[in-house]
Image (cartoon, rainbow, N blue to C red):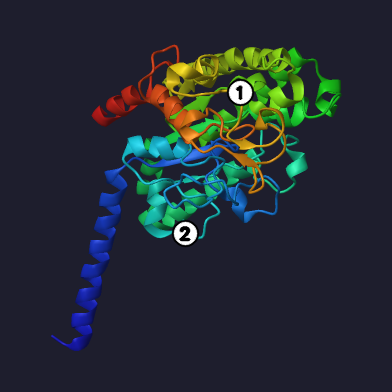
Amino acid sequence: MTAYSSILSFSIVALLLLLSSLSITSEAARAFFVFGDSLVDNGNNNYLATTARADAPPYGIDYPTHRPTGRFSNGLNIPDLISEYLGAESTLPYLSPDLRGEKLLVGANFASAGIGILNDTGIQFVNIIRISRQLQFFEEYQRKLASLVGQPQAKRLVNQALVLVTLGGNDFVNNYYLVPFSARSREFSLPDYVRYIISEYKKILARIHDLGARRVMVTGTGPLGCVPAELAERSLTGECDPELMRAADLFNPQLVQILKELNAQIGSDVFISANAFRMHFDYISNPQAYGFVTSKVACCGQGPYNGIGLCTIASNVCANRNEYAFWDAYHPTEKANRIIVRQMMTGSTDYMSPMNLSTILALDART
């Protein structure tokens, strides 16, 4: 055998081993895709010229590296914890230069802090990845994946993936209620505004299905009026703001309804409703039952309830994050995120409809 033929044979064997490893890797853990806002952003905004960033201390103080990652958390966020249950590594931000090669098989996180259902939500943050752009990135991702493993396997990976979508909260706190007499509040009464954003959300979710998603977990909004930022701005007594609670009460049932409608049109349970309001309100209304000292005061911040401004190196920072339900003015601590994800995994139909994530994983493993 000539040296050339030996090299050629070795190259062919190496290529076959690489393709085999890619196939094995893709079967080893289910891919995971994330769309949404700061509650689920794993660091995309680090790569953008925007003020909606969590790339400086004390963010990440309890992350494994103890360094800020772009997650709006002291540690792990909801997508990280879902990945733990999937037995997979955390999805990388789509804009990360490390998202290439075999990392593509894990999935991708397209979320961007500050965005909403509507394109005019979060305009004050200027350069963020609006949901229409996130979906364009999802298409681009699939082309990259197909180049790596071939079109049939790429399609199968996307079809079999789990998808998380978290939108809606910013359409209230960073749009309709951002300033008194905002453009949207002058245009719509609250009930009409909710109907409008729900109709737009339905189009977004239908598009996600068109792009190949077949298991999509959709979270409603949490108790918007109870976050430290809104307590600091709107509450004299520490009680949740009734107007923002009314917004959530209008939005969430209508979201559940459109998910049912979409499933009926498709003919299968593609869309899973996660009752984020209930998941959050459980520990907000009774923090001591979950080991928290407070669900009103943020761990990191300043002003009343530590709810004014951003969490920065100059902010007050609590010594024990496990005693606080909120990390900053808007976002839960890692401990609170773990409570939320536990309900996503094993919660009753009061929390997850028509089924929880553990049931989904068991069903899909059989089929």
**Place of residue 79 in the rendered image (x, y in percent of width and height, measured from the top left):** 46, 38
Residue sitting farthest toward the bottom: 2
Point out which mark residue 260 bears: none
Residue sitting farthest toward the front: 319
* Residue labelled with disc 2: 98
- Left or right side of 142 for 169: right
Image quadrant where one finds the N terminus: bottom left
- Helix, strand or loop at disc 2? loop
**Place of residue 248 in the rendered image (x, y in percent of width and height, measured from the top left):** 64, 17
Sooner in the amino-acid sequence: mark 1 or mark 2: 2
Give the label, 1 or 2, closer to the camera: 1
Q: Is residue 278 visible?
A: no
Pick the residue in front: 96 or 22: 96
> Who's the residue at 51% across and 24% down the image?
293
Pick the residue in front: 329 or 215: 329
Q: Amino acid at mark 1?
A: Lys
Image quadrant where one finds the C terminus: top left
Pick the residue in front: 145 or 124: 124
* Residue 55 higher or lower than 364, as above or below: below
* Residue labelled with disc 1: 296
- Left or right side of 29 for 220: right
**Place of residue 347 in the rendered image (x, y in percent of width and height, measured from the top left):** 39, 18
Query: Callout 1: 10 Å neighbours few (<14), some, many (20+)?
Result: many
